Image: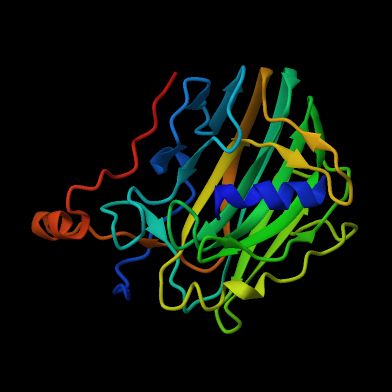
Amino acid sequence: MHRKTWALSVAAAAGLIAHPASGQLTGLTSFTLLEDPPNANLTAAFGSGGEAVLTANGAVPDGVDIGLASVDGPTVSGSTSGFFFAPDTDFSIAIDYAVAFDGSVGAGGIGFGIGVDADGADSAGIGLAFNNGGVLGTASAGRVGDEDTPVGPITILTGPASGRFFVGYDADAGAATVGLSATPGAGVPDGSLPAAPPITEIADAFEGQPLLVSFFLRSEQLTVPLTSTVLPPLSAGTVTATFSNLEVLAGTPIAVPEPAAGLVLLAFGGVALGRRLRTH
């Protein structure tokens, strides 16, 4: 899931790895902090129940975000811990979300998805846009080779401030699907909401590469579709996005193996890995 891609998606709403033993993906406290780039007004913490709380407090520049990923490196093959999904198997995941506003001024979004790399150059997922303390809507989006694919809106100019995001992957088609429910903990997306079309253009980008999971909070300047209206990024107040109850509905997450120290040095060449979550 590319965090940059929500500049498009929320506006529309407003190498081979051997398979080690399978594991559990659902504990958010094992996820790794993502900052793009670090910003003093964006923080992350874990609640007493293990929920992840992402907060924007005050002004945050356009295109800056904070999030968490299921592996600790830039890609699965460049990680030493975490969980991923094999690209040759079907799977489906869901997570509860809630976004709250306290005097919030400006636009942004939250999102949940899958991808080949932590920076989201090849990714797919679902996002929710907000502006001035209100939810604008939700949309699906994909990204291939660091370029946005066509967006399929789920809801237009409306959307629940709390609910459940769904993301699925069809290995045969090489396509992702997304869904939304207004009910936290729901087992399936709401049938009353229009279904987003499959994100099919990710097939080539995902070929043979394992898939990580991530979610985020982002400040974003948005342009309202079919108009010239520009919504500026966050400038004041507080936005709090809480993610919890991550669930694997189908498929089996795989634990990242611990590579030998020499292989780590060879693979990274001194490149810094993702930073662990700071608590505040």
Residue furthest out toward the front: 228
At 72% from the left and 26% from the top, the residue drawn is 100
Task: Name the one closer to the observer, 55 or 93.
Answer: 55
Residue 268 placement (x, y as % from top left): 21, 54
Nearest to the observer: residue 175 or residue 235: 235
Q: Quadrant of the N terminus?
A: bottom right
Residue 40 in view: yes
In this view, the residue in front, 219 or 154, is 219
Left-right relation of 209 to 191: left
Quadrant including the C terminus: top left
Name the residue at 86% across, 43% down: 228
Residue 129 figure quarter:
top right
Q: Residue lying furthest bottom in this view?
A: 172
Which residue corresponds to the image point at 90% horizontal and 58% vertical from the top-left? 192
The x, y position of residue 134, in whole percent, is 82, 30
In the image: residue 41, left or right of residue 187: left
- Residue 251 vertical position relative to residue 49 in the rendered view, above or below: below
| Residue 162 in view (yes/no) | no
Residue 103, how many percent across, how many down?
75, 15
Residue 104 position in % (x across, y down): 73, 20
Q: Nearer the viewer, residue 158 or 193?
A: 158
Image vertical order of residue 249 relative to residue 239, above or below: below
The mark tally for this picture is: 0
The color scheme shown is: rainbow
Compared with residue 274, is residue 134 higher up or lower down, i.e. above or below? Answer: above
Q: Quadrant of residue 221?
A: top right
The residue at 74%/21% (across/down) is: 105
